[in-house]
């Protein structure tokens, strides 16, 4: 892009072009092979503020890392200590402070160390966004559980008390008819990724109303850290349609609408208006739905998925991660992958996550069996679903429509010595499954008795997936994070969809993501029982998943390109070039040179 002095001489028209934070160019060199360049983090950034305004803006603030020339150019001389520090020195100071302060930051004896860490990280986020993401990326294994599950659940529960600075946007039932104009209150002209929730089913904690915004913020932190989505182009959103949580309705300090939730057509009208508004302003944005209660999760997914770039992580992301694990379990048992349709799977949980996993696994089994209607029906018989009321059979009254396809036939269950409502331990004893999969908000399901029963499995190496959200929910017990984390997939699905330019997130793209994750582990690792990678490898995992999603979009003729990479060039790329394309479009937390320009 030339040296700095040349940049300063650029005309006003050219300077405005620098406001775009990332450009990726596919160029054909003299030899005919493609090379890829990116200017992300290596080009000056135009700012329209100086002095204290810069120091108070977390997007541009570098603190003591401002060089002396920048201090002069931006009127910062005298507003900072004289010693210029490197970003590495800043992080070293911050980490030392974090270790020292995490106990003193606790808000009384009920506050946990993890929440204290969240408070300190949040303060850093408020004052220096680049440094915040640098700390998060460099320490992802330690801090992912702080900014996301399980700590984010506690943050959401306490959010009214923790609220200091607004982050994201809030659309409420009181804003009906105003959302199209409201979206223009957000300062970013380009938004790549939105995570939206209505707060109705936050993790395993139930209805937290407007406090659910914390889950959208945490999820987008991981999109930035894992997928390299530019933090200036993400938007957390809360759609506040009220709450049915009586405790919040009676709380004078609650920040949301203190009225019961909208339902039916009124509810759908609010979501419809929101979707129309955000896609009108940002036609290429991707919207991820997060923690909507089961009765709406599937309906909204089916309503929007063929017309908008959107997906539901609870339904589709969880299903993909579980499917990758199930395929890995086949490998770990020393069996060929084609044996997957023979696996007997007991699922504890029939909410949106559980049903999403069942649908994805059933489709995969059917595809392996020839992808016919007969194969699809045959695959149904490999699942036994147990919810809070026990085994689901066709004898049950008022079966949830989404769970109905997996209800066992009465005669079938009788032959196995089971009845409607049979307990989980009975089902495990009689079915002798290859896999026990937990996707429920109910704690303590996998008791010692259940695990003892699994010893009778016909498999030499039965697999246990305890994928329920590990959060505290009033019973005094605290679970711990496990390796089957949606974080392995949703960043790559989002990034791959963005870079492919596909207008929808197809089943094939989701399947490609799951199969990529299943294949990520080496044969040696899988045979040792390691079927999910370490979170420390998340940037590389995301790169591979995104590349797989792009490849599938190309094969389905859905890819339309992204920015300078048009569809024609994208379709010419080989696998290595697609990976390079992905890697060059992943934002990294580096301080850019700042150039002041008057409005």
Image (cartoon, grey):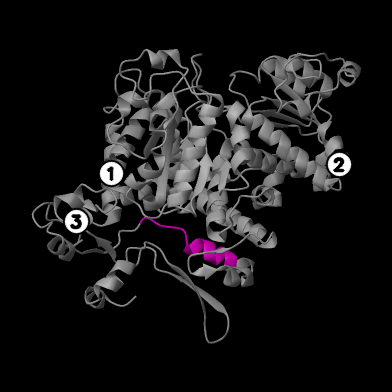
564 lies above or below 138 = below
The tag on residue 49 is: 3
Give the residue drawn at x 20%, y 47%.
56
Mark 1 packing: few (<14 Cα in 10 Å), some, or many (20+)? some
Q: Secondary structure at mark 2?
A: helix
Left or right relative to 300: residue 115: left
Marks 1 and 2 close (CB-CB < 8 Å): no
Mark 1 or mark 2: whose residue is earlier in sequence: 1
Residue 233 visible somewhere in the drawing: yes
C-alpha span from label 1 to label 2:
59 Å
Residue 341 appears in which quarter of the rendering? Answer: top right
Give the residue drawn at x 87%, y 36%.
378
The part of the chain drawn in magenta is 578-589
Mark 2 or mark 3: whose residue is earlier in sequence: 3
C-alpha span from label 1 to label 3:
26 Å
Which residue position is annotated with label 2? Answer: 373
Give the residue drawn at x 61%, y 50%.
505
Residue 141 visible somewhere in the drawing: no
Mark 3 packing: few (<14 Cα in 10 Å), some, or many (20+)? some
Mark 1 or mark 3: whose residue is earlier in sequence: 3
471 lies above or below 286 = above
Kindly report which numbered mark, 1 or 3, lies closer to the viewer in this rendering: 3
């Amino acid at each position: 892009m030339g040296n700095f002095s040349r940049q300063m001489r650029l005309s006003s028209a050219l300077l405005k072009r620098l406001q775009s934070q990332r450009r990726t160019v596919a160029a054909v060199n003299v030899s005919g092979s493609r090379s890829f360049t990116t200017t992300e983090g290596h080009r000056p950034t135009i700012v329209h503020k100086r002095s204290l305004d810069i120091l108070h803006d977390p997007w541009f603030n570098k603190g003591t890392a401002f060089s002396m020339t920048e201090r002069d150019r931006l009127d910062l001389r005298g507003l900072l200590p004289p010693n210029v520090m490197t970003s590495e020195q800043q992080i070293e100071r911050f980490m030392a402070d974090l270790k020292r302060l995490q106990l003193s930051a606790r808000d009384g004896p009920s506050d946990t160390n993890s929440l204290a860490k969240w408070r300190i990280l949040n303060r850093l986020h408020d004052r220096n966004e680049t440094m915040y993401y640098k700390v998060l990326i460099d320490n992802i294994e330690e801090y992912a559980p702080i900014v996301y599950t399980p700590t984010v659940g506690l943050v959401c529960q306490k959010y009214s008390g923790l609220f200091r600075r607004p982050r994201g946007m809030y659309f409420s039932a009181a804003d009906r008819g105003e959302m199209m104009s409201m979206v223009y209150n957000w300062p970013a002209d380009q938004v790549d990724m939105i995570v939206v929730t209505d707060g109705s089913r936050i993790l395993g904690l139930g209805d937290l109303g407007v406090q659910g915004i914390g889950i959208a913020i945490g999820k987008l932190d991981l999109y930035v850290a894992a997928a390299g989505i530019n933090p200036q182009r993400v938007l957390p959103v809360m759609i506040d349609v009220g709450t049915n949580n009586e405790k919040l309705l009676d709380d004078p300090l609650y920040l949301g609408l203190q009225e019961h939730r909208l339902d039916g057509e009124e509810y759908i009208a609010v979501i419809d208006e929101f979707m129309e508004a955000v896609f009108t302003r940002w036609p290429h944005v991707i919207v991820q739905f997060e923690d909507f209660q089961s009765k709406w999760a599937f309906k909204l997914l089916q309503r929007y998925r063929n017309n908008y770039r959107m997906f539901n992580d609870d339904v589709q992301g969880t299903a993909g991660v579980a499917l990758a694990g199930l395929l890995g379990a086949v490998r770990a048992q020393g069996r060929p992958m084609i044996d997957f349709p023979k696996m007997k799977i007991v699922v504890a949980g029939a909410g949106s996550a559980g049903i999403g996993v069942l649908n994805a696994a059933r489709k995969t089994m059917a595809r392996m069996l020839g992808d016919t209607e007969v194969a699809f029906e045959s695959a149904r018989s490999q699942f036994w679903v147990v919810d809070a009321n026990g085994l689901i059979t066709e004898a049950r009254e008022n079966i949830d429509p989404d769970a109905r396809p997996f209800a066992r036939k009465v005669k079938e269950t009788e032959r196995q010595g089971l009845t409607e409502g049979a307990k989980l331990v009975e089902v495990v004893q009689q079915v002798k499954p290859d896999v026990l999969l937990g996707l429920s908000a109910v704690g303590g399901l996998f008791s010692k008795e259940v695990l003892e029963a699994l010893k009778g499995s016909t498999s030499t190496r039965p697999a246990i997936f305890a994928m329920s959200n590990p959060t505290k929910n009033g019973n005094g017990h605290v679970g711990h994070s496990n390796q089957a984390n949606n974080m392995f997939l949703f960043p790559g699905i989002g990034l791959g969809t963005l870079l492919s330019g596909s207008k929808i997130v197809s089943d094939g793209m989701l399947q490609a993501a799951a199969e990529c994750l299943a294949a990520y582990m080496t044969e040696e690792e899988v045979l040792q029982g390691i079927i999910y990678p370490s979170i420390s490898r998340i940037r590389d995992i995301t790169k591979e998943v995104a590349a797989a999603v792009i490849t599938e979009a190309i094969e389905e003729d859905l890819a339309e390109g992204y920015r300078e990479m048009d569809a024609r060039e994208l379709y010419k790329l080989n696998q290595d070039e697609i990976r390079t394309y992905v890697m060059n479009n992943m934002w990294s937390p580096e301080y850019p040179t700042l150039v002041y320009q008057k409005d």
